[in-house]
Amino acid sequence: MDYARYQVEDFLMDTAFVDWVKNPDAQSDAFWHSFLQENPEQQRNIQQAKAALLSLQFDEEPVTDATVDTEWARFRRNQATEPERDVPIIPLRSSLSWWWAAATVAGLLVGLFWWLGRSPDDTLYITAYGQLRTVRLPDGSSVILNANSEIRLPGDWTDRTDREVWLKGEGFFRVVKRPGRTQTRFVVHTDELAVEVLGTSFNVRSRRRQVDVQLQTGSVRLQLTEADTARSLLMKPGDGVSYRPVTGELKRRLITPNRMGIWTQGVLLLDRMTLRELGQIIEETYGRRVVIRSPALARRVLNGSLPTRNEQALLEGIAITLNVPVRLDNNAIIFGE
C-alpha cells in the first residue's frame, strides 16, 4: 500500500487503517507511528480520517408495532404498482408517485413566480451542488450559501429603506449596521416566512416546504407569510425555530451556539439523524437520487459528524459505520444490497 499518496477517502476505504482506528494494538500503533514520522505531510489526512471514523456511531431507533405495520402497508401498496424486486426499494425521489408529480408542478410554478418577480437589474448569487460560496453584500453584511442555494438582491438594493433579500436553500447571515445611515431593517424572505433582523448572525434553511431558523447572536422576528395568519415570533440567541406551512406547525427549541452554521466549515452534524433523513440532505447537497434498499436500513440512526467537502469520503464514512454496501449507479446512490 502506498499510504504516502493516500487522501482522506483512501484511508477510509483501507481495511488495515480502519481496523487500527477502531481496534488499535501495539503492532498497528507502532506501524502508523513509524509511518507518520516518515511522512509528516500525511498527518492532516490521517487526523481527518480518524475523526470521521471515531465521531460516527449509530443507534437502533425504537420502532413501534404501528410504525412497522405502516411501513409494510406502504411496501405492499408500492408492490402492487411496481415491478417485482427481491428487496423493497425506498427511493427518496419517486417519479411514479402522484405526490412527487404534484410537488414537481408546484415547484415549477413557484420557480416561475420567483423568476417573474425578478427585475433585469436584480443580482442573483447561485451555488452548484457540492459548492459553498461567501457573498459580500453592499452594506458590508455577508452570507455563506450552502450547496444548491441562491440569494437575490433587487437592483436598487442600496437605495432602499429596507435591506431585503430573497433566499432559496440555506444561508448563514452576518448582518451589520448600515454605514453612515440611520439603522434600517434587514429582511430575509423565503417562500414560508420573513426574517426581520437588526445586527445579528443567524442561519436560515428553506427546503422541502419547511423552513428552519437558528439565531446565534442579536435578535430577529419571524413573520409568517400566510395571508390569513398574523402570527410572528421574536427569537433570542440560542433559539431554533422550525415551521411547516402545510400543517401550520411551529416548533421552538434550544440549540448550542457552536453547532449553528457548522456546515459552513464543511461539517455535517448528525444528531440522531436517520439514514432516510441523511439521504434527503445528500440529495439536496449533491444532486443525486438516493435509494435505500430496506425500511429497516432507512430507520437506522446516526450520531457524530461527517465531512461534506468530499462526497466520496462522506459516503465511505456512512458505509463503514453502518456496515452496509454503498454504490453509485449513474446518478443514484444506493445503500444496501
Image (cartoon, rainbow, N blue to C red):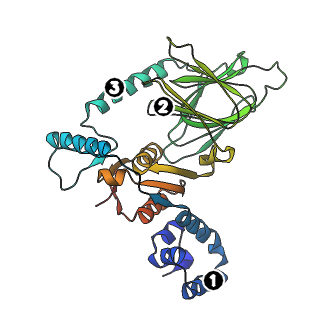
Mark 2 and mark 1 lie on one chain; the one further toward the N terminus is 1
N-terminal-most mark, 2 or 3: 3
Write down the residue under mark 1: 33
Mark 2 and mark 3 residues within 8 Å of each other at the beta carbon = no
Q: Which mark is residue 21?
A: none
- Image location of residue 38, percent across then percent down: 65, 84
The vertical placement of 321 against 301, above or below, is below
- Left or right: 297 as drawn, with respect to 211: left
| Whole-percent x, y for residue 19 in the image | 48, 77
For the residue marked with disc 3, what is the amino acid?
Val
Q: Amino acid at mark 2?
A: Gln
Name the one closer to the observer, 279 or 177: 279
Q: Cα distance, mark 2 to mark 1?
A: 48 Å
Q: In the rendering, at what x and y percent does residue 288 appear?
A: 39, 47
Q: As drawn, is 113 to the left or to the right of 295?
A: right
Which one is closest to the eye, mark 1 or mark 3?
1
In this rendering, does residue 80 appear at all?
Answer: yes
State which quadrant residue 177 falls in. Answer: top right
Q: Position of residue 198 (x, y in %)?
A: 74, 25
Quarter the C terminus occupies: bottom left
Residue where numbered disc 2 is placed: 210
Q: Residue furthest top?
A: 228
Relative to 270, does residue 54 appear above or below in the rendering? Answer: below
In the image, is residue 11 above or below residue 87?
A: below
Is disc 1 in contact with disc 3, using a CB cutoff of under 8 Å?
A: no
Q: Residue furthest front?
A: 65
Residue at the (59%, 52%) spot, across then down:
266
Which sits in the foreground, 197 or 255? Answer: 255
From the image, state whether disc 2 or disc 1 is nearer to you. 2
Q: Mark 2 or mark 3: which is in front?
A: 2
Question: Where residue 105 is drawn, which disc sits there?
Answer: 3
